[in-house]
Image (cartoon, grey):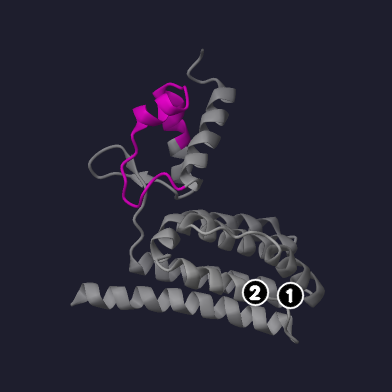
Amino acid sequence: MSAFDPITQERVYHAVKGDYLAGIFQQGMQLDIQGIADRHGASKTPVREAVHRLMGERLVEPDPKGGFRIPHLGPDDLIHIYAWNAHLLLSITHSMKASVLRQTLDRFAALNMGDTPLALVSFTGAIFTAFAETSGNSEATATIGNINERLLYSRIAETTDINEAARELRTLTNSAVADVQKNVRRRIESYHVRKIERQQRLKEENQR
């Protein structure tokens, strides 16, 4: 089989990205190219091609020791990403009709959000992506989706209290309020402020 077989490359790309989204890696973890190739029944060439595509999506980065690794986002990185994510989501929800917003919230309120850090983080990302999708702007949807993917492992690490995280999601998806648009915007802002303040505290601790 040709090393440049596009069908194989596409299959391996989706398989490796599936590994990433399934949470099987860790922050700062070096990727075992041969191990990934063995797991997905491929040679190392399409795996490297897949990893380079994931680098373009900023889900993987070069390892100074050689090869590739999962990024370990520091406080400054996370402060900037969370601030940008909040800005986008607040802009999107500002223009959403209240009826559409309620329908979106009710759809998620009826779903099982799971009880593991990965499940809760994935559920959070799905809510934010749904907000973007309702805008009808494909660029907004793609950007929010990529931010969710980049934040996956950081959000998992931050989910130290399952009950608190689940409570936050139940609050976020509650549409039983008089002014749903105002309440959702407040919840989005509150969510991101907590995340940013946590990173600011960690930054200050690291500077001591």
Q: Is residue 184 above or below residue 125?
A: below
Name the residue nearer the viewer: 190 or 91.
Answer: 190
At horizontal 42% and vertical 21% (from top left) the residue drawn is 43
* Contact check, label 2 and label 1, Cβ < 8 Å: yes
Q: Is residue 3 above or below residue 11?
A: above
- Mark 2–mark 1 Cα distance, whole angstroms, equals 7 Å
Looking at the figure, which quarter contains the C terminus?
bottom left
> Based on the displayed image, in which of its 4 quarters is residue 92 positioned?
bottom right
Q: Amino acid at mark 1?
A: Ser
Q: Is residue 188 above or below residue 145?
A: below
User: Which type of secondary structure does the marked residue at label 1 adopt?
Assistant: loop
Left or right, 90 with reference to 82: right
Q: Which residue is mark 1?
A: 95
- Mark 1, Cα crowd under 10 Å, few <14 / some 14-19 / many 20+, is few
Q: Position of residue 173 (x, y in %)?
A: 66, 71
> Based on the displayed image, in which of its 4 quarters is residue 195 positioned?
bottom left
Name the residue nearer the viewer: 173 or 191.
Answer: 173
User: Which type of secondary structure does the marked residue at label 2 adopt?
Assistant: helix
Q: Amino acid at mark 2?
A: Ser
Q: Position of residue 132 (x, y in %)?
A: 67, 63
Q: Which residue is mark 2?
A: 91
Determine if the magenta segment contains residue 40: yes
At horizontal 59% and vertical 24% (from top left) the residue drawn is 7
Q: Which residue ends up furthest to the bottom in the rendered image?
A: 178
Determine if the magenta segment contains residue 59: no
Which region shows up in magenta?
A: 23-50
